[in-house]
Image (spheres, rainbow, N blue to C red):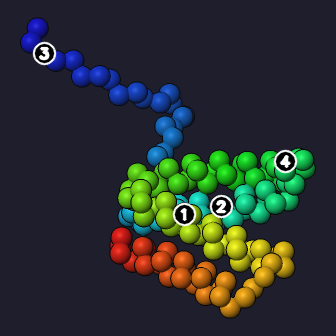
């Protein structure tokens, strides 16, 4: 009567295996940084797709923009499990800002003045600095 009941562990039927939990490679923080960089790169994708969507009047660039933005947000939120919000958000926005500015220069022929490139380099140094400081 004084026995405590332990919940039974679910056993898969013969011939079936339980799904394996997928663990990220490396430490949790390193994996979070990789996910964060991926989220930042998707910032570039959705911003450029928005340009091509022409005010959401073109279907496929609009779909790409929405899917890339949602995926980027999800990846950012996953990285926030292990990274400080201020650092992660600054890096996420910084990668997107620098990437979109460079994509505009390269793909869309936007101005590439020395002062503009210099300012982008300052942002890039800040992004790298945040990564180094956070470890």
- Disc 3: which residue: 3
1 left or right, relative to 55: left
- Nearer to us in this view, 87 or 79: 87
- Earlier-in-chain disc, 4 versus 1: 4
Q: Nearer the viewer, mark 4 or mark 1?
A: 4
Choose top left, top right, bottom left or bottom right for residue 4: top left
Residue at disc 3, secondary structure: loop
Mark 4–mark 3 Cα distance, whole angstroms, equals 64 Å
Dot 2, crowdedness within 10 Å: few (<14), some or many (≥20)? Answer: many
Q: For the image shown, how many numbered marks are present on the structure?
A: 4
Q: Nearer the viewer, mark 4 or mark 3?
A: 4
- Earlier-in-chain disc, 1 versus 3: 3
Mark 2–mark 1 Cα distance, whole angstroms, equals 8 Å
- Earlier-in-chain disc, 3 versus 2: 3
Q: Which residue appears at 84% of the width and 47% of the height?
A: 56
Q: Position of residue 51 (x, y in %)?
A: 81, 60
Mark 2–mark 4 Cα distance, whole angstroms, equals 17 Å
Q: Are marks 1 and 3 in contact (CB under 8 Å)?
A: no
- Rendered position, 120 above or below 77: below
- Nearer to us in this view, 26 or 41: 41
- Disc 1: which residue: 92
Q: Are marks 2 and 4 in contact (CB under 8 Å)?
A: no
- Earlier-in-chain disc, 2 versus 4: 2
Choose top left, top right, bottom left or bottom right for residue 104: bottom right
Mark 1–mark 3 Cα distance, whole angstroms, equals 53 Å
- Disc 4: which residue: 56
Q: Are marks 2 and 1 in contact (CB under 8 Å)?
A: yes
Mark 3–mark 2 Cα distance, whole angstroms, equals 56 Å
């Amino acid at each position: 009567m004084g026995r405590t009941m332990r919940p039974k562990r679910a056993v898969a039927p013969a011939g079936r295996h339980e799904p394996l939990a997928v663990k990220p490679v490396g430490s949790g923080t390193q994996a979070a940084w990789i996910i964060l960089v991926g989220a930042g790169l998707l910032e570039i994708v959705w911003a450029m797709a928005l340009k091509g969507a022409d005010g959401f009047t073109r279907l496929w660039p609009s779909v790409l923009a929405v899917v890339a933005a949602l995926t980027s947000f999800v990846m950012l939120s996953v990285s926030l499990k292990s990274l400080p919000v201020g650092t992660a958000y600054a890096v996420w926005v910084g990668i997107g800002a620098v990437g979109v500015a460079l994509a505009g220069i390269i793909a869309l022929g936007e101005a590439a003045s020395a002062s503009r490139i210099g300012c982008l380099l300052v942002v890039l140094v800040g992004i790298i600095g945040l990564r180094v400081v956070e470890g």
